[in-house]
Amino acid sequence: MEKKKPLALACDHAGLPLKEELKKHLDALGEPYVDLGTNDRASVDYPEYAHKLCLEISSGRCARGVLVCGTGVGMCMAANKHKGIRAAVVSDTFSARMTRMHNDANVLCLGARVVGAGLAADILDLFLNTAYEGGRHQRRVDLLNALDENKKP
Ligand code: RB5
């Protein structure tokens, strides 16, 4: 059987406390992950961490990732500039489920200053365990992917 790919995790200084909570949650579930930093509270720039994480996905080492910053918004903007990345900033469980079912999101962005650890863990569970529906949504995901071709690398 093929080995399960680890989930990629990254954050900036504002996202660090929530990323640590999510790691505890993943440890309890026995879910494999790779932590790409940052790992201290010194101020860093979120686009650099989003880029690191997207490279893990585009290389095929990881299938999905989670990015955490203060709001989740900056990480999401940075991640969506990468080919093949469909990142969603989520702060409710309905959107967490729908972005997997309809958008086949491969990166979840969370705001440490927006959601508490309990809600974030529920959102992460839905992100990990909800299947993409395909069907009528595939045409739209194909159109999203086609937009990548118009982007400068
Ligand atoms: C850092 O202060 C903050 O701007 C960053 O974590 C994030 O919220 C950006 O979108």
Image (spheres, rainbow, N blue to C red):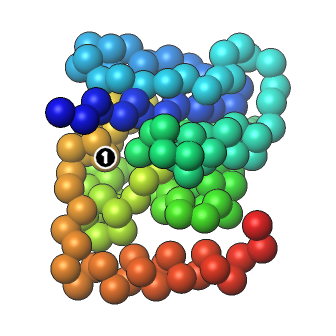
Q: Secondary structure at mark 1?
A: helix
Q: Which quarter is ligand 1 in? A: top right
Q: Is residue 41 left or right of residue 15?
A: right
Q: Position of residue 11 (x, y in %)?
A: 62, 32
The residue at the point 39 percent across, 77 percent down is 141
| Residue 9 visible at all | yes
| Quarter of the view holding residue 71 | top right
Q: Report the number of numbered marks.
A: 1
- Residue lying farthest front? 1
Q: Relative to 44, is 139 above or below?
A: below
The residue at the point 23 percent across, 20 percent down is 29
Q: Relative to 142, is 60 above or below?
A: above
| Quarter of the view holding residue 35 | top right
The residue at the point 71 percent across, 76 percent down is 151
The quadrant of the picture occupied by the C terminus is: bottom right
| Residue 22 visible at all | no
| Quarter of the view holding residue 62 | top left
The residue at the point 75 percent across, 46 percent down is 47
Q: Position of residue 33 (x, y in %)?
A: 42, 25
Amino acid type at image mark 1? Phe
Q: Which of the pair 103/70 is nearer the observer? A: 103
Q: Is residue 27 left or right of residue 19?
A: left
Label 1: how many Cα within 10 Å (few below 14, some 14–19, many 20+): many
Q: Which of the pair 103/7 is nearer the observer? A: 7
- The residue where tag 1 is placed is 127
Q: Is residue 77 left or right of residue 131?
A: right
